[in-house]
Image: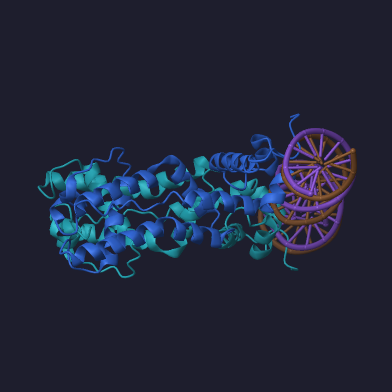
Chain colours: A blue, B cyan, C brown, D purple
Amino acid sequence: MVKCGRPPKGQECQSRERLLDSALQLFLEHGYGDLSMETIAKDAHVSMRTIYSRFGNKAGLFGAVIKRCSDQFVDRLPENLEPGEALTVFAKHYVHLITRPDAVRIRTILIGESLRFPELAAQFYEQGPQRARDALVEFFIKKQQGGYFAQMNPRVLADHFLSCLRNEHFQKLQSYRPRKAGGLTVISSPKGCHC
Amino acid sequence: MVKCGRPPKGQECQSRERLLDSALQLFLEHGYGDLSMETIAKDAHVSMRTIYSRFGNKAGLFGAVIKRCSDQFVDRLPENLEPGEALTVFAKHYVHLITRPDAVRIRTILIGESLRFPELAAQFYEQGPQRARDALVEFFIKKQQGGYFAQMNPRVLADHFLSCLRNEHFQKLQSYRPRKAGGLTVISSPKGCHC
DNA sequence: ATTAAAAGGTAATACAAATTACCGTTTAAT
DNA sequence: ATTAAACGGTAATTTGTATTACCTTTTAAT
């Protein structure tokens, strides 16, 4: 590479993004332990000096990558829709999220490194899946006040619902077929439950 | 240690067992990457020479440890019992197996190292959980011929059943309360399904 | 124009840990 | 009794890689 030196104005963050992109892809491919900083630097066309000055060390870089991933878990619970349909939208989004190969890989790596980075794994779940769960609990509380769904503990309700969605994933069902409210509000109408 | 030299007759395998025991405990505690051979040798009161002459290298030792663990998955489907009760026995055993902290740790570590040891992870699942699943499928086939359970694909039946059991685990339900056939044969009687 | 900031590139440095080597000791086997 | 097997203990060897150090280059700011 001939190009070097202080970057032009407005492109200061470009190399940072490129670095995070490369790092994510490489972590997904090789995991944490089997990936050297040199490989990352080469792939991102960035010097190791840059990585260390920005993220301190390898753990810092990994943390930044993971942090960016957890942002994908945004709530997707439309307020204006009929409750059952809102749940359907949420379910599709959720199943899509936890099913994507990248997301599976991330969780796999995070689980494996949970001993080395206990706080990081916890942080990921708090900023990621837990946020979705919290939103769902709030949703159930509101809709229960409107007379919808079974009048039971909304947290239990949310956990059961998410559990069923996760089951879809573990069952390796490739296609998710939305079936309106009846098929999704499995708790209030057990007939539609696949378990 | 003063004790050394060729071991007395009949105790040749003692150090081997002790080594595997120590290694398992240490792997459970520290995972694979963060555990040094020296630590293992010290803990097992065994020389590194012994480890290498027996298992070749670290990966070989890890493989032997994991292999021994997968043997815990023995079938527990009594033939003489009433089908529902047989399922109950199986379910209790299965949930117990996958819930034990040690088993959880093993899976966690295995998942994390699945990139480094792809064949090992696959082998564990084949010799472990998969065996239980196969036995369950066979069980359903036999009992279906006797008129029990829904007349559907026995593999789907088995997967759904196992899925529910796993859900119990993921829900972190601490106590498992057996509820006779009605509560467990959830597929033929959806009323008892918790999902 | 001059100075400081922000990178790049290469080559030490440091260090941990796996693997080997060497030697001494105890027991089995003959 | 002698030899070989199986092991313990210590230390060398090797390797991989994270982290630093040093120097050069380009651009921003004044």
- Image quadrant containing the C terminus of chain B: bottom left
Please say if A112 is above or below A100.
below
Q: Give the left or right position of residue B109, taking residue A172 as reference.
A: right
The quarter of the picture where residue B138 lies is top left
Q: Give the left or right position of residue B84, taking residue A13 as reference.
A: left
Q: Give the left or right position of residue A78, taking residue A112 as reference.
A: left
Of A74 and A103, the residue lying toward us:
A74
Which residue is at a point 44% across and 45% down the rendered structure image?
A: A103
The quarter of the picture where residue B34 lies is bottom right
x, y (%) of residue B190? 14, 56
Residue B8 visible, this orientation: yes
Residue B67 visible, this orientation: no
Residue lying at the far left of the rendered structure = B147
Of C14 and B181, the residue lying toward us:
C14
Which residue is at a point 62% across and 48% down the rendered structure image?
A: A33
Which residue is at a point 13% across and 47% down the rendered structure image?
A: B150
x, y (%) of residue A177? 23, 40
x, y (%) of residue B83? 17, 56
Of A43 and A110, the residue lying toward us:
A43
x, y (%) of residue A37? 68, 44
Please say if C9 is above or below C4.
above
- Image quadrant containing the N terminus of chain B: bottom right
Of B57 and A125, the residue lying toward us:
A125
